[in-house]
Image (cartoon, grey):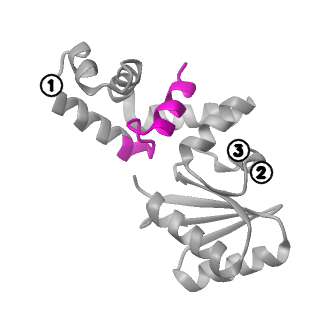
Amino acid sequence: MGSSALTLFVLRPSDMESAVSFFQMVQPFELVVVGEGILRVRASFYETEDWESLHQQLTEELLIRTKAFTSPIDSNLDLSLADAVLKDLTFGFHSFPEVIAEAVLQGRTAFVQAVRRFVEGAVGDELLRTVLSFIADDLNQSKAAKNLYMHRNTLLYRIDQFAQLCGIDPRRFDGAFAIKLLFR
C-alpha cells in the first residue's frame, strides 16, 4: 500500500489543538484539519500498525479520547465521505475494513460506492475475482485454489497483491467481511 491516512474525530477543540501539536512534534506529517472535530494525518511511510501505535501514544500520553481509523489515500477514494461513519463509531482505533463494514450497515451508499470504485481500480478484475472466490470458499486456500484451477502459491501471491494494493487483507475476518459486504 502506498500513502495512508489516519482520520481522527476529536470532541473538544482544546484536544484538537493538542492532537495537532502532537503530530507536528512526532514527524513531519501532512495535517489536514477538516473541521467539526475531524483531523486527517497523511504519510507515505506509515502502515496500519504504525498508526495504531501512534494513536495509542496520543491517547495515553495526552489523555485525548478519539475515534480513529486508517485508510489508503487514493484520488478515487473521498475520505470525507467516511467522516459521518467515524462519528458513529465507538471511541478507539478502527481498521479500514471495520469502517467499510459499518458504512455498508449504516447505508452510507456514497462512501460504499467510492470504496468499491477504489478497490476495483486498485486491484483489477482478476485479483478481485480471485479474492471473492477465496471468500466464497470460506477462506480455505486449498479449496479456493482447486476451484480456481491454480496452484495454491499462486492464490497466496494474488491475495498478498490484493492486500498490498488496497489495504484490505481478505485473510483476516474484518477484511473478508468488508469485501463480502462491498461486493454482495
Going from the N terminus, do you reach mark 1 or mark 2 first? 2
Q: Residue at x 36, y 38 (%)?
A: 162
In terms of depth relative to the viewer, which is nearer, 134 or 20? 134
First of labels 3, 1 by sequence position = 3
Mark 2 crowd level (few <14, some 14–19, many ≥20, 10 Å Cα): some
- Dot 2 amino acid type: Lys
Label 2 sits on a secondary structure element that is helix
Q: Quadrant of the C terminus?
A: top right
- Mark 3 and 2 residues: CB-CB less than 8 Å, in contact? no
Q: Which of the 4 image quarters holds residue 25?
A: bottom right
The magenta stretch is 163-184
Task: Pinpoint residue 163: horizontal percent, then vertical percent.
Answer: 38, 42
Separation of residues labelled 3 and 1 (CA atoms): 39 Å
In this rendering, the label closer to the viewer, 3 or 2: 2
Residue where numbered disc 3 is placed: 81
Element carrying mark 1: loop
173 within the magenta span:
yes
> Which residue is label 2 attached to?
87
Residue 19 on image: x %, y %: 69, 76
What kind of element bears circle 3?
Answer: helix
Badge 1 is on which residue?
151
Placement of 49 over or under 168, stated as above or below: below
* Amino acid under disc 3: Leu
Asked whether residue 172 is drawn in magenta, I would say: yes
Instruction: Pick whichever, 135 or 77, lies toward us.
Output: 135
Q: Amino acid at mark 1?
A: His
In the rendered structure, the answer to whether residue 150 lies left or right of residue 118 reads: left
Quadrant of the rendered image containing residue 130 = top left
Which residue lies at the image location 73% right of the left edge and 44% below the top edge? 85
